[in-house]
Amino acid sequence: MTHNADTEALVHEFDRYRPVLFGLAYRMLGSAMDAEDILQEAFLRWQQSPRHTVQSPRAFLMTIVTRLCLDALRAARTRREHYVGPWLPEPLVSTGTPDPTARAEQEETLSFAFLLLLERLTPLERAVFILHEVFGYSYDEIAGLIGSNGPHCRQLGHRARQRLSTERPRFRADPAQAEQAARAFARACAAGDLQGLLAIFAHDIALWTDGGGKARAARNIIYGADRVARFFVGIMRKAGRMMTFERACVNGQPGLLVWIDGRLDRVYAFDFDARGRIQAVYGVLNPDKLCGITRG
């Protein structure tokens, strides 16, 4: 086989596993840009490894990506301690409606609510939990990926489930209700309609805004329907005429892109309660997290 043909075969084999590798890296890091960096490094190591040493390409690549993510997570912990205001994941955006055939549990593990819960775990707990709960690996298989043993991985998984069990949502909002609430939010915001917002907000709603010190945003989480609704009415009074809302699928759920004079200003993701009311709003304004999103 020629060098070019060998390289092409390596690229083809790597691309077979790219979706699952990206899914792992994104859930581990909460950043699409960082996940892509991890995949680039993984491909270089894949390219440099002698073929006779690779018995299972998938296992080999999952091991590399998992360990690279663990290193990246440990480094990120220090940076996030000094992050300005609430930290939110980098949004995964596609225009249009969520895929109705997608597995509900897979979409749930991409949601902002779920990714924020994962922030409570240590890097090893996070890796074990994701690999077991999302990708279906046994604890013995995970042990091989992270360089540990089965009983220790089982203990890490148990500890992770205990930490998350009290706050992990026990229900999933009806997709049609969630879609309707997101559209109603856009209409009420555009109109500066305080009562319209209150009608679709859960009473204990929380608003997270991530500007990262690079965009104007609330430095603390805002709680309560009245306070959150008045916050949005205030925004629209200042910049409402310049804002346009675009429907989008954000991390597998109904969301919105907000444009000002053709520039993406922010992305809104939502969490919904069992009645389809908005339980949380996640506003990503940090321009570093928006640069890869284009208009649909």
Image (cartoon, rainbow, N blue to C red):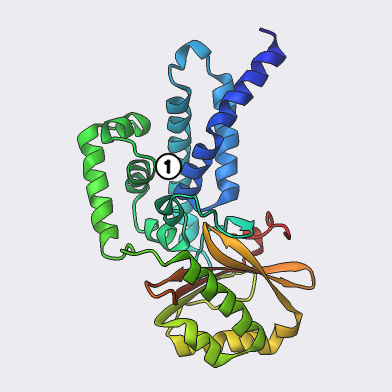
Residue situated in front as seen by the camera: 42 or 254: 254
Please name the amino acid that badge 1 sits on.
Leu
174 or 217, nearer to the observer: 174
Q: In this rendering, does residue 212 appear at all?
A: no
Quadrant that contains the C terminus: bottom right
Tell me where residue 275 appears, x and y as whole percent: 39, 75
Residue identifier under label 1: 70
Q: Where is residue 7, by image quadrant? A: top right
For label 1, the crowd category at 10 Å Cα-Cα, with few meaning under 14, some 14 to 19 and many 20 or more, is many
Q: Quadrant of residue 90?
A: bottom right
Q: Is residue 32 positioned above or below 137 on the image?
A: below
The vertical placement of 91 against 202, above or below, is above
Give residue 193's position: percent from left, percent from top: 60, 90
Residue 59: % across, % down: 42, 27
The residue lying at 59 percent from left, 42 percent from top is: 36
Q: Looking at the image, which residue sits at the far right?
A: 261
Q: Is residue 141 left or right of residue 45?
A: left
- Residue at the spot 39% in from the left edge and 40% down from the top edge: 135
Residue toward you, 83 or 130 = 130
Measuring 69% from the left and 14% from the top, which residue is drawn there?
5
Q: Quadrant of residue 272?
A: bottom left
Please indicate whether residue 245 sits to the left or right of residue 87 in the image. Answer: right
Question: Where does residue 32 sit, x and y in percent of width and height?
Answer: 57, 50
Specify the quadrant that holds the N terminus: top right
Figure check: 164 above or below 143: below
